[in-house]
Image: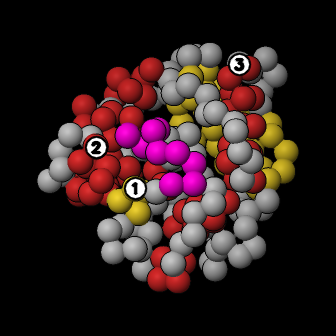
Amino acid sequence: MSGTPPDCVTGVLESTWGDIVVTAGERGVWRCDLPEPPAGAPEPWVRTGRARAPKGAPALLREALEFARAALEGVEGIRPPKVHPDVWRQASPYQREVWRVLQRIPRGRVLTYAEVARRAGRPAAVRAAGGACGANPLALFIPCHRVVAAHGGLGGFSGGLGWKRGLLPREGVTIGADAARGK
C-alpha cells in the first residue's frame, strides 16, 4: 500500500503483547498493525489496556480502536467500522474479491483457502487467495484469521500464528491439536 491518506490519523490500543496500531479517518479504517506475538502465544492470551488517540481524532478512529478491543476480548455483536476507500482502490481486483469474501465469513466460522478462492471466482487460485489474505492491511477488520488450511492446520496469518490461535477460539471456533501447535 502506498502512503497513508491525508485524512487518516493513528491511534494505539495497548496490550500485553505490545501496541496495536490502528490508522483511520472519517472515510474509514486504513491499517491495523499487530505486534509480534510472544513465544508460546496464546497462553496467556493477550489482554488489552488503554486506547489512545490524538486530541481531535475522528470518531471513526475511536470506534476502530474499540472494535479492535472487542475482537480481542471475544465480544460479540460489534460490527467493524467501514474500510477506507483507498484500501480498496490500492488493492488488486483479485485482492478486493478475496477481501469481500473474508468480510462475509461469519464470526465462529472458518473457510479453507480453496473455498475462499472458489467464492472469489477463481477456484484454481488457492495460493493467490492465500497471498491476498497475507496482503490484507486490516487483519482484525477484514477477518483473514477465519481462513484455514484444507488439511486442518491453521495456515498462515500476517500478524503471526499466535494471534490466529487466540482469535479463533474467542469466536467459538474449535481448533484441532495440530492447528493449535501451528501445523
Is residue 90 positioned above or below 109 on the image? Answer: above
Is residue 154 positioned above or below 53 on the image? Answer: below
Residue at 66% in and 72% down: 42
52 vs 61, left or right, is right
Q: Amino acid at mark 3?
A: Pro
Q: Which residue is mark 1?
A: 111
Q: Nearer the viewer, residue 81 or 160?
A: 81
Name the N-terminal-most of marks 1 and 2.
1
Instruction: Return the mark for residue 86.
Output: none
Q: Amino acid at mark 2?
A: Arg
92 vs 82, left or right, is left
Q: Main secondary structure of the magenta part?
A: loop
Q: Are marks 1 and 2 in contact (CB under 8 Å)?
A: yes
Give percent across and percent down for residue 161: 52, 67
Name the N-terminal-most of marks 3 and 2.
3
| Local SS, label 1 | strand
Q: Which residues are magenta?
A: 101-109
Give percent across and percent down for residue 183: 42, 80
* 102 magenta-colored: yes
Callout 1: 10 Å neighbours few (<14), some, many (20+)? Answer: some
Residue 144 appears in view: yes
Q: Which residue is mark 2?
A: 119
| Local SS, label 2 | helix
Give percent across and percent down for residue 35: 62, 57
